[in-house]
Image (cartoon, rainbow, N blue to C red):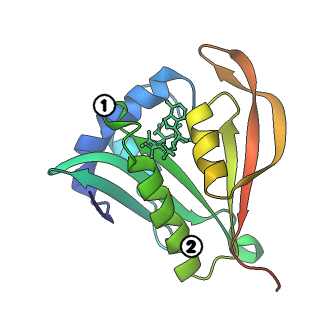
Amino acid sequence: MEIRAARSTDIAEIAPFFRAIVADGESYTYPDDLTDDEIRDAWLAPPPGHTIVAVVDGTVVGTARMGPNKPGRGDHVGTASFMVDPASSARGVGRAMAEWVIRWHRENGYKAIQFNAVVETNVAAVRLWESLGFRIIGTVPRAYRSRRHGLVGLHIMYLELENGS
Ligand SMILES: CC(C)(COP(=O)(O)OP(=O)(O)OC[C@H]1O[C@@H](n2cnc3c(N)ncnc32)[C@H](O)[C@@H]1OP(=O)(O)O)[C@@H](O)C(=O)NCCC(=O)NCCS
């Protein structure tokens, strides 16, 4: 598996699984049926953010975007979002990208990573983040309308990278 910076031309491969994951209704709050151009604008993070793709045998099987969670005085805390093509799930793509993303935050001087909205019923994601050291800071009750589970909570998850000031 190769992990490299995403290019504008990758959107053609990202868009079908992006739309499938959003339509599945269990993880994201993007509107359904975004066009490829809207997905490009939403997903390709401008500097200082960054977007990567995971490529297997020449095919884009996953992508992640990252960058400061807040601007200005909050920009020492990063955030990230992940999507793995359902056809390639549970094969280590998400874990490999997450490890890459944590390293990127360390190398770029971030002191922590905060996930703002992890759907509490998204067991694969919650397990993966916890296995990497993220902890649940709190849960916003009934903040997500899961297609299968109805109103469920959104976890804020947090990984400290560096103690002190
Ligand atoms: C969540 C997601 C990124 C995980 O990526 P993945 O490539 O499928 O996951 P991996 O194969 O790397 O598995 C990593 C861990 O996830 C967990 N996991 C993966 N699939 C799982 C499943 N079906 N059930 C339970 N746990 C699962 C396991 O803890 C696994 O640990 P392991 O490495 O010890 O096996 C991916 O499923 C995805 O894109 N889902 C839809 C979008 C999404 O939920 N994004 C995250 C929003 S917070």
Image location (x, y in percent) of residue 93: 38, 49
Q: Residue at x 40, y 47 (%)?
A: 92
Residue type at mark 1 is Ala
Residue at horizontal 41 percent and vertical 56 percent from the top: 44
Secondary structure at badge 1 equals helix
Q: Quadrant of the C terminus?
A: bottom right
The spot of residue 60 in percent (x, y) is 25, 48
Secondary structure at badge 2 equals helix
On-image quarter of the N terminus: bottom left
Q: What residue is shown with label 1? A: 87
Q: Check disc 1: other Cα within 10 Å, few if <14, some if 14-19, many if 20+.
A: few
Find disc 2 in the rendering and name its residue: 105
**First-in-chain label (2 vs 1):** 1
State left or right for residue 66 relative to residue 91: right
Q: Nearer the viewer, mark 2 or mark 1?
A: 1
Residue 27 is left or right of residue 18, and the answer is right
Q: CA distance from mark 2 to mark 1?
A: 28 Å
- Which residue occupies the extreme bottom position in the image? 165
Image coordinates for residue 29, horizontal then vertical, percent: 59, 33
